[in-house]
């Protein structure tokens, strides 16, 4: 009798394994960035309003900041924009916009329409710095500490929960810098 | 009437078809390989082969189950550009793979490396085969002794 139950047991174990696999399949779509805990790569990028201005890695260091990757072509960036604006207003650290593979006129028109949420702008037209950052889709949001170490990355649009999480982490970084 | 036209057409084109068949086959094959790949100027045939092999074993992270070679996504184009640039810089295949893994993690590799967390992945089939063999041996022995 017990021997007859073995195939059933195997079947149930397999079923359990598959159900567990289903749950993680959503998470598996997200590429965990290997850059967390690593220094922000070197870069030198123009601004958005002033194409001749140049911002490099060292210009951003000293204070922690949020780096928000967006593009006017990116539909989900519109979805998250109200939360990005809130981050710009409420977060205790600087919010840097990283305009990715976008046309300058399109980006400026987008900001005219939806509002400029960011304290500072970087423009990566060719997408080379984005590759160094391991960016694979907009929107993406990084948290970088005052020493230039990437501490956190969120992939996909910011919603109410993610906003709370980012706020908490931003306050932690701020406190860390001050201590 | 219609039949006659078709018939004569066939007769005239008979030899032409034979002549064109390899050309057509070549064109289709070339199209299949080069569908998503930009016309890069390679220094050598070897470099072209290496580019193709790398683009096929690196995953396009924005696409569902496509390699860099398969994808028309803008990011895949950029990454192919990076692979090409690194080939021009005489970087090794391993250096190029490492470049991608440093930025996008093991996920970009279609052939995951053998490591502690991938042991089950690589060893799993062998373990299952062993379990099957042991089970088979036990069953066969039992049947023999029952005879």
Image (cartoon, rainbow, N blue to C red):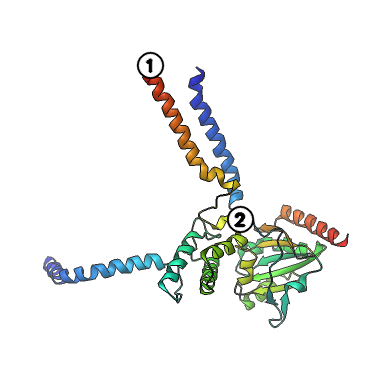
- From what the image shows, is residue B116 above or below residue A105? above
Residue marked by disc 2: A31
Question: How many angstroms separate mark 2 from mark 1 (CA)?
Answer: 55 Å
**Neighbour class for label 1 at 10 Å: few (<14), some, many (≥20)?**
few
Q: Can residue B137 be seen in this view?
A: yes
Question: Is A19 or A4 nearer to us in this picture?
Answer: A4
Q: Quarter holding the C terminus of chain A?
A: bottom right
Task: Residue A42: name its quadrant.
Answer: bottom right
Task: Residue A30: name its quadrant.
Answer: bottom right
Q: Mark 1 lies on which chain?
A: B
Q: Under tag 1, what secondary structure?
A: helix
Q: Which residue is at 56% across, 45% downward?
A: B119
Residue A121 in percent (x, y) is at 72, 73
Task: Tell whether B36 sits left or right of A172.
Answer: left
**Neighbour class for label 2 at 10 Å: few (<14), some, many (≥20)?**
some
Q: Under tag 2, what secondary structure?
A: loop
Q: Which chain carries label 2?
A: A
Badge count: 2
- From what the image shows, is residue B11 above or below residue A34? below
Q: Which residue is at 78% across, 62% downward?
A: A145
Task: Residue A31: name its quadrant.
Answer: bottom right
Q: Are marks 2 and 1 on the same chain?
A: no
Residue A136 in percent (x, y) is at 60, 62
Residue B146 badge: 1
């Amino acid at each position: 009798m017990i021997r007859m139950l073995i195939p059933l047991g195997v079947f149930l174990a397999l079923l359990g394994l598959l159900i567990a696999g289903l749950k993680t399949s959503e998470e598996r779509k997200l590429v965990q960035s290997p850059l967390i805990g690593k220094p922000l790569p070197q870069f030198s990028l123009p601004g958005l309003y002033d194409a001749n201005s140049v911002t490099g890695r060292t210009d951003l260091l000293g204070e922690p900041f949020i780096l928000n990757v967006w593009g006017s072509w990116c539909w989900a960036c519109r979805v998250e924009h109200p939360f990005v604006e809130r981050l710009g207003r409420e977060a205790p650290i600087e919010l840097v916009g990283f305009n990715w593979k976008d046309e300058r006129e399109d980006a400026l028109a987008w900001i005219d329409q939806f509002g400029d949420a960011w304290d500072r702008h970087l423009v990566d037209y060719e997408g080379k710095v984005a590759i160094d950052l391991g960016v694979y889709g907009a929107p993406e949001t990084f948290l970088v500490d005052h020493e230039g170490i990437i501490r956190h990355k969120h992939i996909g649009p910011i919603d109410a929960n993610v906003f709370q999480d980012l706020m908490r982490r931003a306050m932690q970084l701020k406190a860390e810098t001050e201590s | 009437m219609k039949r006659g036209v078709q018939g004569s057409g066939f007769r005239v084109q008979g030899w032409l078809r034979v002549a064109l068949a390899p050309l057509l086959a070549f064109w289709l094959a070339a199209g299949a390989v080069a569908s998503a790949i930009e016309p890069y100027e390679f220094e050598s045939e070897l470099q072209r082969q290496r580019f193709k092999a790398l683009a096929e074993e690196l995953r396009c992270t924005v696409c569902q189950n496509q390699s860099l070679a398969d994808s028309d996504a803008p990011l895949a184009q950029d990454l192919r550009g990076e692979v090409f640039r690194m080939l021009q810089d005489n970087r090794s295949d391993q250096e190029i793979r490492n470049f991608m893994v440093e930025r996008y993690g093991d996920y970009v590799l279609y052939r995951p490396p053998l490591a502690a967390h991938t042991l089950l992945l690589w060893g799993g089939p062998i373990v299952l085969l062993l379990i099957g063999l042991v089970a088979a041996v036990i069953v066969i022995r039992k049947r023999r002794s029952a005879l």
